[in-house]
């Protein structure tokens, strides 16, 4: 019995030490931005959930809102009703995190909609997570061809292709974005920046929103959730996942 307790205490200590290293691998630019921190937290939550469950069902999403306090600690302040079964795991993960250094985001809300994945090799995944060895989704400018809402003859022309993408995105936002009634009644205005991943299959996976009031952030996330399936971007002819940032402005006329 004593050996079992000692082993459990040692395991907890090792995990705590690992958590302390979680953000240390971020470079100087990433350290100052909240998005890389959110991406790391998502993967850790995913790992802890898979570790406790035999299998994650397809298309399981967790949606909620964090608050990053003045000490650099993330707190869960809102969680979607469908995601409440994971609340204890999320709170446990957040309690073990080291302080973040992205001070310009202190005392601000960060909303998220993350997709859970099955993890075939948990030990390898955890090791790569802590050492940050996985591939970070490239930015648009790094691609050979950009994602597209639909097939067009300018797929190989990056300048025209990005114009078509931007115009289609603006049209989508104009049609789908709805000013939250509660925010309008309280005269809440602002601009939120929504970061999301377009996968190599053309689907939307993780979505994060920063800046502005959480009511506006969550509406930004909802609007991105409604995007259609894309023709994925490529690098040297190979389809690849890509990150994209889309600002959304809420102004009462």
Image (tube, rainbow, N blue to C red):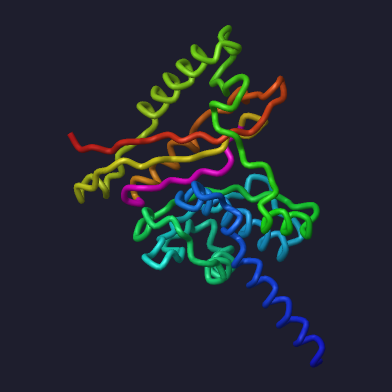
Residue 233 left/right relative to 169: right
**Outermost residue, bottom side:** 2
Q: Is residue 75 visible?
A: no
Q: Considering only vertical position in the picture, is 242 above or below 84?
A: above
Which residue occupies 79% across, 92% down? 2
Identify which residue, 51 or 10, lies in the foreground: 10
Residue 162 left/right relative to 186: right
Which residue occupies 53% across, 62% down? 84
Tell me where residue 57 appears, x and y as whole percent: 69, 50
Where is the C terminus found, in terms of image quarters? top left
**Outermost residue, front side:** 28
Q: Report if residue 208 lies within the magenta region.
A: yes
Q: Considering only vertical position in the picture, is 163 above or below 112?
A: above
Which residue occupies 68% across, 49% down? 117
Residue 31 left/right relative to 181: right
Where is the N terminus found, in terms of image quarters? bottom right
Residue range (magenta): 203-214
Tell me where residue 98 appears, x and y as whole percent: 53, 67
Q: Considering only vertical position in the picture, is 5 above or below 195?
A: below
Quarter where residue 170 is shown: top left
Which residue occupies 76% across, 60% down? 54
**Outermost residue, top side:** 153
Tell me where residue 156 appears, x and y as whole percent: 60, 12
């Amino acid at each position: 019995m004593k050996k079992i307790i000692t082993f459990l205490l040692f395991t907890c200590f090792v995990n705590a030490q690992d958590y302390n290293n979680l953000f240390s691998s971020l470079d100087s630019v990433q350290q100052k931005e909240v998005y890389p921190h959110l991406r790391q937290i998502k993967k850790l939550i995913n790992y802890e959930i898979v570790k406790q469950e035999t299998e994650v069902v397809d298309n399981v999403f967790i949606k909620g809102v964090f608050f990053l306090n003045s000490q650099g600690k993330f707190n869960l302040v809102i969680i979607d009703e469908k995601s409440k079964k994971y609340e204890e795991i999320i709170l446990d993960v957040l309690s073990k995190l080291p302080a973040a250094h992205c001070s310009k985001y202190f005392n601000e809300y960060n909303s998220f909609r993350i997709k859970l994945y099955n993890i075939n090799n948990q030990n390898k995944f955890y090791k790569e997570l802590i050492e940050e060895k996985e591939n970070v989704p490239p930015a648009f400018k790094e691609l050979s061809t950009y994602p597209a809402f639909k097939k067009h003859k300018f797929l190989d022309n990056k300048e025209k292709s990005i114009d078509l993408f931007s115009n289609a995105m603006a049209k989508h936002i104009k049609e789908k974005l709805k000013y939250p009634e509660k925010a309008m009644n309280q005269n809440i205005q602002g601009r939120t920046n929504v970061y999301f991943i377009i996968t190599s299959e053309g689907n939307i996976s993780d979505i994060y929103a920063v800046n502005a009031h959480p009511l506006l952030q969550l509406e930004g996330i909802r609007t991105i959730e409604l995007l259609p399936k894309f023709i994925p971007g490529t690098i040297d002819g190979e389809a690849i996942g890509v990150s994209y940032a889309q600002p959304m402005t809420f102004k009462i006329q």
